[in-house]
Amino acid sequence: MEITCINCPVGCLLQVEMAGGKVLSVSGQVCKRGEIYAHQECVNPTRMITAVVPVAGSQMPLSVKTEQPIPKQDINKCMAELAAVQVEAPVRMGEVIIRNVCDSGVNIIATKEIARTV
Amino acid sequence: MRHFSREVDVLIVGGGPAGLGAAIAVKENGIDNLLVLERANFLGGILGQCIHNGFGLHRFGEELTGPEYAQRDIDRVKELGIEIQTETMVLSVGEDLVVSAVSSKNGMQLIKAKAIILAMGCRERPRGALGTPGTRCAGIYSAGTAQQFVNLEGYMPGKRVVILGSGDIGLIMARRMTLQGAKVLACVELMPYSSGLNRNIVQCLQDYDIPLYLSHTVIDIKGKDRLTGVTIAKVDDNRQPIPGSEKDLECDTLLLSVGLIPENELSQGAGVDLSPLTSGPVVDDSFQTSIPGIFTCGNVLHVHDLVDYVSEESFKAGRSAAQYIKGLLPPADTVQVLDGEGVRGTVPQRIRLGQEESIALMFRPSGVFRNAVCTVTSGGRQIARKRAQIFTPGEMVTINLKKEEVAALSDSVTVSIERSK
Amino acid sequence: MYTDILIIGAGVIGCAVARELSAYEASITVLDRACDVSEGASKANTGLVHAGFDAEPGSMKAKTNVRGAAMFQDLCEELGVPYVQNGALVVGFEEEDRFVLEGLLKRGEENKVEGLKILSGKEALKLEPNLNPNISYALSIPSAGITSPYELTFALADHAAVNGVSFQFNQEVKNLNLDEDGLWRVTTNQGEFTAKILINCAGEQSAVLHNMISAEPLHIIHRRGQYYLLDRIQPVPFERTVFQCPTKMGKGVVVSRTVHNNMIIGPTAEDIEDGQDTSTTAEGLKTVVEKSCLTWPGLALRSTISNFSGIRAHEKGGDFIIGEVNGAKGAYEAVGIESPGLSAAPAIGEMLRGLIVKKEGLQKKASFVPPIKRPKPFNEMTVEEQAKAVEENPLHGHIVCRCEVVTEEEIRQAIRRPVGATTLDGVKRRVRAGMGRCQGGFCSPKVIDILSEELNLPKTEITKSGGQSYLLTGNITDALKGEE
């Protein structure tokens, strides 16, 4: 498979040879970071998810994030859980909004303070 | 004599990352009588709506979301007991360092300052500045406005989206809209390259199978009431649409991410000299403008790629303003910093002579240069160089002048990018 | 619904007529198919108050233009609408243009326009140093002026409304009939109106309506004019409005400052099929720039903030048609009102009022409410006045539109006016929020909030300009939940 390295603006196009879920070889990178990235991205791609959720008692929605990256294939499930979540103001920054989202072992936490305004 | 509501040593216009950083530095450098004026009802500026992560890697060694990054400066400002007025709009800045500002709470204030730091940030280029023809229907927003609707108000501006421009805000919004259930049909970029980060192209477009059309633009906007579609076309080397390459996309929303413009109407009113290249004030290495006592930093000076560098710059500007108040920043002769080949809008534009501090020169490359060298020359001598695999307009380049070289300066300085042979 | 007088069209003509007649004993209703007043040609033109040198002597255009222009100063003063008599120049670049300019001068003098004078290129450059130095001659028209066409229309509408005129929007006329008892029956998409007196001021649609009730058909050609509007941060290059001398290459474009010190350049003149197609085209905009550069070599396109087009209703015969509709009792009209329609509007209002009052025997009301003068915009106040305004009303201390410095109080007032804004564009044209260089990028979310509050509507029902022009499509979780 072919992926673009995201480490720097060069954006090396990496050719990754895979077999049995394992990386056999990586080529196309101009530096070592490309190889590390290819291993991670091809074997277990993960993403940080950030979003906002409505908050009862506030005009402004609450911004949230996954505390750690979650598996890339869980993104839609994660968003569905976020769409269903009920949050009430006030909220502290860092407060856990969803524990163990999509069974990933990762929590979703608040990234800002929300005061009660309504 | 005019009656002033109050007098302060340093007045800072803007409570975004630049204004907060400058305020912290002013206070930490021993000036207590300072005031920050912010027009919004919250601090942190545009970071508040940048809920994605990736901020702070350089400054804090960790990846934060925009609101988290802002909170660190807000906490520090509060800790230092710096006075802030939010929901206060500065209406004018005078050459005499008198600022008029208005708010519901405090009414009209006329504030006399000994030094002013301009930190108003930038705004997005609107559709009207592009001259894109078509109708004037609803559904056309700049990407940042859409970001405000989604992230600060909790509303969706549309369902089927085309994005014009592949700057980072456009890319980030492609993902944001997709995650909230909208369909993003395409990201269309006039240039043959994207000015966005590779990471964003991969994680905001490729992850969601959103096609990126390079060397394309929107040539028509359709829809009587709400947008019903746009026509895109491939462009030639002169950025002119190529007949026959048109393609219609049915959409209800067009987001524009086509450039940021430093917001210098106040600076202009004060009579500060502006650079046509950066659209920001002309400054020396202390971030002082052409008017003594008026300093500036952040996106109002030149549009940055990373907030980390905005903070770094604002600390320097804040420190300079403090020195100015203490009389430690005497007027000095300066040499010019000139843009050479491949370089556009170097900041600062002037370097003071007779000092001994290292200086960071920052600029945007004028195109994509692979395997190239950035050099700084003065008086026919090379005084700094930096090699890189790639220089692109999307990434700001910083090149440092060592203090020995600064001390030895006597002639103008030229920054250029040379392709390696 | 019955009304004594039914006016179709809430543009500058319909509103001028409504205001004139509102001083008389009659119930008056104004219908418009759009969601607001001034939604047609009245919102998208150059905003010039022509002196009247251009029209064919003796024509209805010449007559109403010269009379209308003479009324402008007092009318704008009374209504609190911006008006500046900035003068105009018609410039030529060839030696032979002198003859054309002399022809215009002669025609102007026949129309009784005062102060006309031919200038040498040098004299013209002395007046306007930023003109193309290749200018050969210019015709100076000191009595020409500029106004804000939509602000004038809003003010006329408001004044009519405080005197009892009812405005009904989103009413598209489908049919007109004179029934047996001599009443006009007007069917719209929303219902039916009956009226004793019918006045057709329907602009681009005026011939269609005319042809429904007259055996002598009229024909409107839709003439589109495209414009660029420039940021007002730069000092205006010309105090005067600058026309180009018509040549065998065609009619030139106008370069003019507006009353708000933006520069406006245009229009093109393209005859198009669809009278509602106000789109701009790449070709049209290019023409505007190329022609404008001839007048103004220093034009820098980087300062454009908007482009738009307006449709002028050009009647085939070339003149305004104002008066009674032949063979249709109680029906009056103003058809084919293109340029100089804005300049002529006060006179057209006066003329139709005079005719109708006489023909229909209307009686003057005992009391006529004077106009609510438009308050001075915050942006134009002195610092002392601003301080006082905020003290009196703290909402003046909240600046919503930073580019044009428009306060929350001004936006709320725009919505609460007698014929108040109901849309984002309505607010924009009344108080300029969103009219500046960021084109509403920063303030539209706030203006939507205020509209939603004032009109008591959910934010998703606020529109840009009525109809289906919704600004928001739902809240952030709607789309995700919809998928489940």
Image (cartoon, coloured by chain):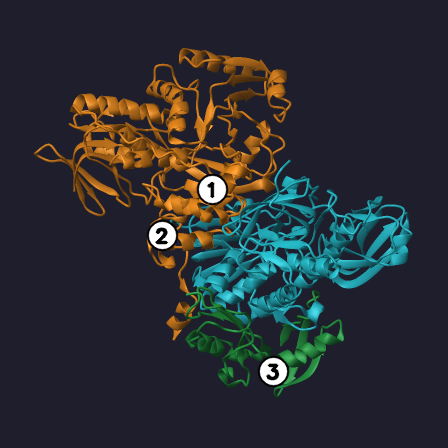
Q: CA distance from mark 2 to mark 1?
A: 21 Å
Tell me the residue that label 3 is attached to. Answer: A44
- Look at the picture and state if C49 lies above or below B214: above
Are the residues under badges 2 and 1 in a single subunit?
Answer: yes
- Chain letter for the residue marked with disc 2 in the picture: C
Q: CA distance from mark 1 to mark 3?
A: 62 Å
Tell me the residue that label 1 is attached to. Answer: C389
In x, y percent, where is residue B221? 46, 49
Mark 2 burial class by Cα count in 10 Å: few <14, some 14-19, many 20+: some
Tell me the residue that label 2 is attached to. Answer: C454
Which colour represents chain A? green
- Look at the picture and state if B3 lies above or below A52: above
Are the residues under badges 2 and 3 in a single subunit?
Answer: no
Residue type, label 1: Ala
- What chain is colored orange? C
Circle 3 — which element? loop
Residue extending farthest to the bottom is: A20
- Residue at the (86%, 48%) spot, across then down: B353
Circle 2 — which element? helix
- Viewer-closest of B53 and C228: B53
